[in-house]
Amino acid sequence: MKPIKPNVLLKDLRELIEEARQDVARQVNSALVLLYWRVGKRIHQDILKEKRAEYGKQILHTLSAQLVSEFGSGFTARNLSNMVRFAEVFQDEKILHTVCAKLSWSHFRLIIYLDDDLKRDFYTEMCRLEGWSVRALEKKISGMLFERTALSRKPDKLIRHELDELRTEDKLTPDLVFRDPYFLDFLGLKDRYLEKDVEDAIMREMEHFILELGIGFTFVARQKRIQVDSDDYYLDLLFYHRGLKRLVAIDLKLGDFKPSDKGQMELYLRWLTKYEQKPGEEAPIGLILCAGKKKETVELLELEKSGIRVASYWTKVLPRELLQKKLHEAILHARNRLAQTGTISDKKLLEH
C-alpha cells in the first residue's frame, strides 16, 4: 500500500474544511433570513392593530434603540422597516424556506421593494435557480430583465403558472430564458450595426453574450454549415441550453423582420432536428434577432407556436427612435464605404 503524500492529504483536508464552512454559512444565512422575516411579521401585526401610520414610525425607532444596544447594528430602524416590508410582500413562510438557502438578506432587500408580486417572484426564482450574486441581481433588475423577458407579455395567470412550476419543479420554459429585446451594448457596436460587425463582435465577446442570454447556454458553433440537397446554408450561431435541454439556433438579421426569415429558420430547425438532436433532448428552438421588429408581423405568423422567438437589436443607452436613426446612418456609412471602394456603384447606392 502506497503512503499518502502530505500535499494530497492537505488538499483533502482543506476541501473538507471548506465544505463544512460553506454548510455552516448556508445554515446561518437561512436562520438569519427567517429571523428577519419573523421579526418583520411580528412588528407588522402590532402596527396593524394600532391602525395609525405615525405609530409605525414611532415604534420602529423605539424598538431599534433597544435592539441595537442588545443585538447590534442589524436592527436599526431602517432595517426593521425592511423586515416589515419583507413580511408584507412574502407572506408564505414555507416558500421562504425553499429560497433562503440560496438568497441572502442583501438579495431580499433588493427584491422586496419591486412594485409587482409577479416581478418579485420572477427575480426570486431566477436568482435561486441561477445562483446570482447580489451585484448580478442588481444588474438584472436595473436592466429590466423581467420587462424584456417574453414571459412578461403573457397574461398574469400564465405567468403565475410558469413561476409556480419553476418553484416546484425547477422547470425552465423558453419564455423564461429568451429576452426581448436583447441588450447588445456590451458588444461595443456603437454605430457599426452591419451583420458582419455583429457576428465579429459576438465572437470577440462571446462570454458576455452568453451571460446576457442567461446561465445554461453553451456555445456550439458559429456559421454552422447546413446542407440541404446541393445547397449550403450557414446558421449564424448555435447554442445548447442545459436547462431547456435543446439546441438554440440564432440568426442575425439587419432590418425589419420578414416572413422569409421565418421560413429560413424553420428550415434550419428541421435540419437540426434530423441531424443534430440527440436522444432525450427537446426539439431545437430558434431565435431571430432583427433590427426594428414589426410586432404585427410576428403576431400574424404566430411564431410562438412554431418554436421561434423574435427579438430586436436594442441598447440600453438609446431609445428606439434614436437607435433606428443610428442604424440607418450606419447602413449609409457602410454603403458609402463600399461605393468608394467600387464594390457597388453610385447608381445602386442611390437606389437604396
Image (tube, rainbow, N blue to C red):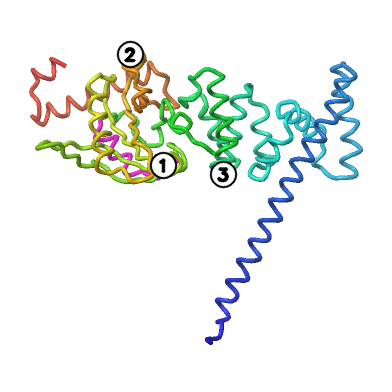
Residue 294 at x, y = what percent? 33, 15
Residue at 72% from the left image edge and 45% from the top image edge = 30
Taking 194 as reference, is 52 left or right? right
Residue 320 at x, y = what percent? 39, 18
Q: Are marks 1 and 3 in contact (CB under 8 Å)?
A: no
Determine crowd level at label 1: few under 14, some 14-19, many 20+ residues with C-alpha closer than 10 A.
Answer: some
Q: Quick one: 138 or 217, which is closer to the camera? A: 217
Mark toward the viewer: 1 or 3: 1
- What's the magenta bit mostly, secondary-structure-wise? helix
Q: Are marks 2 and 1 in contact (CB under 8 Å)?
A: no
Taking 86 as reference, is 329 left or right? left
For label 2, the residue is 300
Residue stretch in magenta: 195-211
Separation of marks 3 and 2 at Cα, in angstroms: 38 Å
Residue 283 at x, y = what percent? 35, 36
Residue at 24% from the left image edge and 43% from the top image edge = 275
**Residue 105 higher or lower than 324, as above or below:** below
Type of amino acid under label 3: Gly
Labels 1 and 3: the sequence-earlier one = 3
Residue 45 at x, y = what percent? 85, 25
Query: Magenta stretch: residue 25 in it?
Result: no
SS of the residue under disc 3:
loop
Residue at 86% from the left image edge and 18% from the top image edge = 54
Image quadrant assignment for residue 343: top left
Determine crowd level at label 3: few under 14, some 14-19, many 20+ residues with C-alpha closer than 10 A.
Answer: some
SS of the residue under disc 2:
helix
Query: Magenta stretch: residue 208 in it?
Result: yes
Labels 2 and 1: the sequence-earlier one = 1
SS of the residue under disc 1:
loop
Separation of marks 2 and 1 at Cα, in angstroms: 28 Å
For label 3, the residue is 131
Image quadrant assignment for residue 78: top right
